[in-house]
Amino acid sequence: MLWLTWRQHRAQLLVTLGFLAVLGVVLLVSGQLALGAANGEISSYCRGGGVPCREYDAGLEDLYQRVYPLIVILPFVPLLAGTFWGAPLLAREYERNTYQLAWTQSVSRGRWLGVKFGVLALCAALAGLVSGQMFGKWLELFPGRAETLSETSYFGAVGIAPAAWWLFAFALGTAAGVLARKTLPAIAITVAVFVAASIALLVLRPQYADPVRTIGADSSAKDGLILEAGRIAPDGREVGLLDEVPGCPLGRGMNECVEAAGYRDFTVYQPVSRFWRFQWTEAGILLAATAVLGGIAVRGTVRRRR
């Protein structure tokens, strides 16, 4: 069964491996450029408090922004496992009627599905871990970019979350193949549900834990996920930061004027120290969904007569 799994799915596995290799090369090249800047003359001046600090920071930011279009699509890379691994796994058997031969041999349906699903699920988890580690190491080259909650665009592409997303996408594609029994509809279902799940967790993520509320300046809010910010008026009312404060015109000195008028800033946020807690929470949610989808695939395959 292991050899059969490799023979039937080697094209998908090799294409995915090639994609990860290209991604690794892009991150490696840009990382070397960042390291060159960090070890260069500008960096040494910067560490000594020299004038070129802003030039050095701007260079790193420019390099980061050039790679940013690639960063934005990273959370959707697990769709490779869903659309090219999971969706055809069973849908193609139904579509070509080859399941009537494959499932009447000496290998039972349960073993057939268990080996195939298990091997590909393991490969999906490894691919997610590799991509997450590569991206995480690359982010460490840019101050304030790694292990942050403020960058919601790539939270699911760094740490342990990518492994869970890859597993979820693969199980989703497999379950969609069982339900649709045709490859193209299964792929469409996988993409639609994956995007919906991504949006749902993006909305749910700030609620993984009760947020922290502080009054006044709080340095721990830096790199955290800001949920709300405003001012508390002397009478206890909450107003927005952009709301007009009587007697304090916009411009230089406004903050001092607002403070003198008795207004106090407040911030509601999720601190960056909860990064790994949020990673494990999201991974747990996705693994639970993966178990449900895997159950759907098993039930639809093992118990289905035709």
Image (spheres, grey):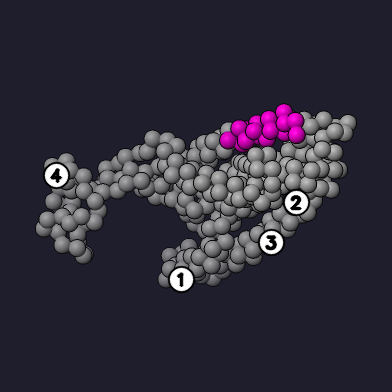
* Mark 4 residue type: Pro
Q: For residue 109, what is the image quadrant?
A: top right
Quote the CA–CA distance across marks 2 and 3: 14 Å
- According to the picture, the residue beneath numbered tag 2 turns out to be 13
Q: Earlier in the sequence, mark 2 or mark 1?
A: 2
- According to the picture, the residue beneath numbered tag 1 turns out to be 55
Residue at 88% over, 31% down: 106
Q: Position of residue 196 (x, y in %)?
A: 51, 46
- Residues at badges 3 and 1 in contact (C-beta under 8 Å)? no
Q: Quadrant of the C terminus?
A: top right
- According to the picture, the residue beneath numbered tag 3 turns out to be 22
Q: Residue furthest top?
A: 303
Q: Position of residue 84 (x, y in %)?
A: 69, 51
Q: Earlier in the sequence, mark 2 or mark 4?
A: 2
Would you place residue 125 above or below residue 35 in this image? above
Q: Earlier in the sequence, mark 3 or mark 4?
A: 3
Quote the CA–CA distance across marks 1 and 4: 42 Å
